[in-house]
Amino acid sequence: MGKPSIGILAGMGPRSTGPFIDMVVKECQRQYGARDDIDFPKMMICSQPAPFYEDRPVDHAAMEDAIRSGLQDLERTGVDFLAIACNTAHIYYPQLARSVKVPLLNMVELTLEAIPSAAQKVALIAARPTVESDVYQTGIRARGLSLFEPDWQSQVDHLLGMTRTSAAPPEFTRQWGVLTEAARAGGVDTLIVACLDLSAVVAHAKTDLRIVDAAECLAREIVKQWLLRT
């Protein structure tokens, strides 16, 4: 029997696909010392176009249909388990998990579980549909943590838009600085970054606040689950 294969649904947005796969590769190196090409997992990657626009509400039915279609395309390739590299997609997680016959990892739960025990007050930085769904906030409160909820979504939207139009590190650093300073002023000790496009530029957030990156949590679990099946 051959080694297991991984199905990764990405492409939401497309610029985050490459950085996320890099995270998975780095996790292979970190978790089990992968070096040569043969050491790495077989990954089937679907960069799925999704009906997401910065300037209009999400058509949830169309979004769910697009994500389900991508997952089922991956399932048909014979993968052993699936992961969705998109936080907003997890709004529909229960239905999506039922739509496939292989296990589907849950990035939201993995991220919530990764919040350090020392955390007391957290803030969420995510795309507007993820924030509006309350999927993270519900889990944060259920863990007895204090949640800082500033009126900063327009600033987050601006930073998210920049990931599609800019590659200037100083501007990313400046925009992250606005958010991290607001968090610090609100008594926050831990930031949850729950957007793959923002994860791709989170290295520009020069702060000593703890950062729990949902993309890193998912990449870490993908490799862990692959190793368990190997």
Image: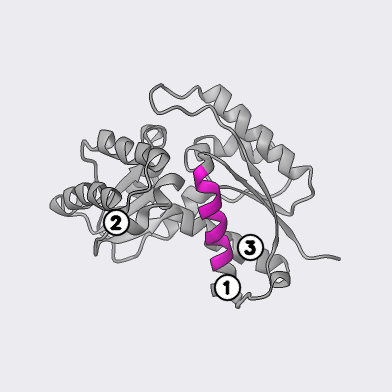
Dot 2 amino acid type: Ala
| Helix, strand or loop for disc 2 | loop
Give the CA separation, mark 3 to mark 1. Answer: 15 Å
Foreground mark, 2 or 3?
A: 2
Label at residue 29? 1
The location of residue 188, given as percent across then percent down, is 21, 54
First along the sequence among labels 3 and 1 = 1
Dot 1 amino acid type: Gln
Would you say residue 138 sits in the magenta stretch? no
Q: Number of labelled discs? A: 3
Residue sitting farthest toward the left = 185
Give the CA separation, mark 2 to mark 3. Answer: 30 Å
Give the CA separation, mark 2 to mark 1. Answer: 24 Å
28, above or below 163, in the image: below
The location of residue 106, given as percent across then percent down, is 54, 49
- Residue at left 32%, top 35%? 157
Decide: marks 2, 3 in contact (CB < 8 A)? no
The location of residue 42, given as percent across then percent down, is 72, 60
Dot 3 amino acid type: Gln
Image-based side of 161 in relation to 230, left or right? left
Quarter of the image containing the N terminus?
A: bottom right
The stretch of residues the image draws in magenta is: 15-26
Residue sitting farthest toward the right = 1
Decide: marks 3, 1 in contact (CB < 8 A)? no
Label 3 neighbourhood size at 10 Å, few (<14), some (14-19), many (20+)?
some
Label at residue 205? 2
The residue to which callout 3 is attached is: 225
